[in-house]
């Protein structure tokens, strides 16, 4: 019987609650919880399938922990002034107008196609004896097979305007409109399918000759892969479902408590607390965001949203850059999801869920205590408003 009333509360709530109050059965809300978990699991899986995370090569900052990979026109050494790991690679030249550092022998990187590397990230710092920014040239080269064939990018906008200041950079690479700005040298023989090294070069005018230093850290190529394929998806998935169970019971308890209190304040007869608690649990078939209906609709809406790509600096920030990562994630959502019709619908339907749960609660307490429709609606509405503002304050 309880299973029939669970579904009847969805399409014929007045009849359903008339039967529910005759013999309240906690198995009904428990069935709703089970169905909600199934729908929530679908929502979590569908939403996770839309996420792509950047994975770095190398994984542990090996390229800037030692100068063994590097060559330069200046004196090379491992510097303790770094952002990631234990060292950065540094080059120093005395009374010069040009300083360059290059790294080769790092393998072959395919930066073409949908599954190729999409970004090159690094942190760079320059030091000029007089604080003068590079006044002649600032370029990044990506070697294709050998050093005579390469792609060149003007990185004047990628370096700080101030001497002795780290700058965090990610440049798009490969084929595509987002990678505009790269200029191939030897057009017919420079290939994105075969990137084998790179070079940073900063130049000053002859009149700006001085002692120069360049430092590079946190250098890696980035390739995006599905979140579903990562090692921590399963732990995230399980923990999110465990949270959903906890959230269900907290919302159920809070809402029932507020209903009981408002009934008391309006001098109504509450009856047994346990009966009210069980009966109101049947209304959770549509409760936002944990109800069966809500989670099912969310699963559908997520399925039509475009995929999101999160760079490493967004989903795995270094210590001290958590706020920057949070802002970057927000910008990614604002650019890709917020303008879509599906996302906007998911926002507006929350109001429909709220009105629906208020209506179901009114039907439930009218059937339970015999209140007039007006009084039942007032009790339900006030209780939901209190619940709506209090629930976010409970950090569980």
Image (cartoon, rainbow, N blue to C red):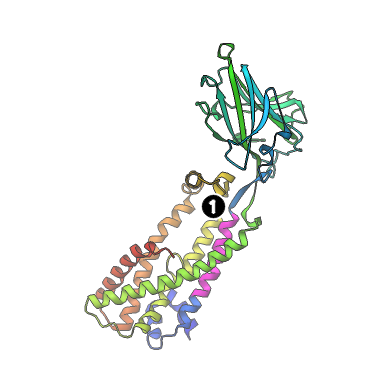
Taking the image as shown, residue 393 lies to the left or right of residue 337, namely left
Q: Which residues are magenta?
A: 33-49
What is the x, y in percent for residue 332? Answer: 51, 45
Question: In the displayed structure, would residue 300 be above or below residue 335?
Answer: below
Q: Is residue 217 above or below residue 387?
A: above
Q: Is residue 322 visible?
A: yes
Q: Which residue is mark 1?
A: 305
Identify the image quadrant of the C terminus: bottom left
Q: Quadrant of residue 91?
A: top right
Residue lying at 55% horizontally and 61% vertically, measured from the top left: 44
Q: Looking at this view, is 300 or 154 the one in front?
A: 154
Q: Quadrant of residue 188?
A: top right
Residue 335: in sight, yes or no?
no
Q: Identify the residue at horizontal 73%, vertical 39% (top origin).
A: 110
User: Which residue is outermost to the left?
Assistant: 267
Q: Residue, x 56% and y 44% (percent of image)?
A: 313
Residue 137 vs residue 190, the one in the foreground: 137
Taking the image as shown, residue 379 lies to the left or right of residue 181, namely left
Q: Name the image quarter holding residue 206.
A: top right
Q: Residue at x 47, y 77 (%)?
A: 7
Secondary structure mostly seen in the magenta stretch: helix
Disc 1 packing (10 Å; few <14; some 14–19; many ≥20): some
Residue 126: % across, % down = 57, 27
**Disc 1 secondary structure class:** loop
Front residue of 193/218: it is: 218
Total numbered labels placed on residues in the image: 1
Asked whether residue 246 is drawn in magenta, I would say no
Left or right of 223, for residue 392: left
| Most distant residue in the bottom direction | 23
Q: Is residue 79 left or right of residue 332?
A: right
């Amino acid at each position: 019987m309880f299973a029939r009333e669970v579904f009847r509360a969805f399409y014929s709530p007045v009849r359903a609650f008339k039967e529910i109050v005759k013999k309240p059965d906690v198995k009904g809300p428990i069935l709703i919880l089970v169905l909600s978990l199934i729908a929530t699991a679908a929502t979590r899986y569908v939403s996770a399938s839309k996420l792509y995370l950047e994975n770095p090569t190398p994984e542990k900052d090996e390229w800037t922990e030692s100068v063994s990979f590097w060559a330069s026109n200046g004196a090379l050494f491992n510097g303790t002034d770094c952002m990631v790991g234990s060292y950065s690679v540094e080059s120093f030249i005395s009374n010069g107008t040009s300083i360059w550092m290059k790294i080769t022998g790092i393998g072959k990187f395919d930066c073409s196609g949908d599954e190729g590397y999409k970004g090159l990230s690094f942190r760079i710092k320059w030091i000029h004896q007089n604080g003068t920014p590079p006044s002649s040239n600032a370029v990044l080269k990506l070697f294709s097979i050998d050093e005579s064939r390469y792609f060149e990018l003007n990185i004047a906008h990628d370096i700080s305007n101030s001497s002795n200041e780290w700058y965090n950079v990610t440049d798009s690479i490969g084929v595509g409109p987002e990678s505009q700005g790269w200029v191939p040298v030897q057009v017919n023989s420079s290939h994105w399918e075969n990137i084998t090294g790179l070079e940073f070069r900063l130049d000053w005018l002859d009149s700006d000759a001085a002692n120069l230093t360049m430092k590079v850290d946190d250098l890696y190529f980035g390739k995006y892969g599905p979140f579903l394929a990562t090692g921590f998806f399963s732990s995230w998935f399980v923990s999110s479902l465990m949270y959903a169970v906890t959230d269900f019971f907290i919302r159920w308890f809070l809402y029932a408590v507020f209903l009981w209190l408002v009934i008391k304040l309006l001098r109504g007869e509450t009856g047994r607390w346990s009966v009210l608690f069980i009966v109101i649990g049947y209304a959770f078939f549509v409760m936002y965001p944990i109800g069966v209906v809500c989670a099912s609709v969310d699963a559908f809406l997520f399925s039509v949203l475009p995929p999101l790509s999160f760079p490493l600096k967004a989903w795995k920030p270094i210590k001290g850059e958590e706020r920057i990562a949070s802002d970057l994630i927000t910008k990614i959502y604002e650019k890709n999801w917020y303008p879509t019709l599906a996302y906007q619908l998911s926002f507006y339907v929350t109001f429909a869920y709220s009105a629906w749960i208020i209506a179901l609660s009114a039907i439930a307490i009218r059937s339970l205590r015999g209140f007039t429709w007006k009084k039942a609606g007032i009790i339900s509405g006030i209780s939901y408003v209190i619940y709506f503002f209090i629930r976010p304050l409970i950090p569980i």
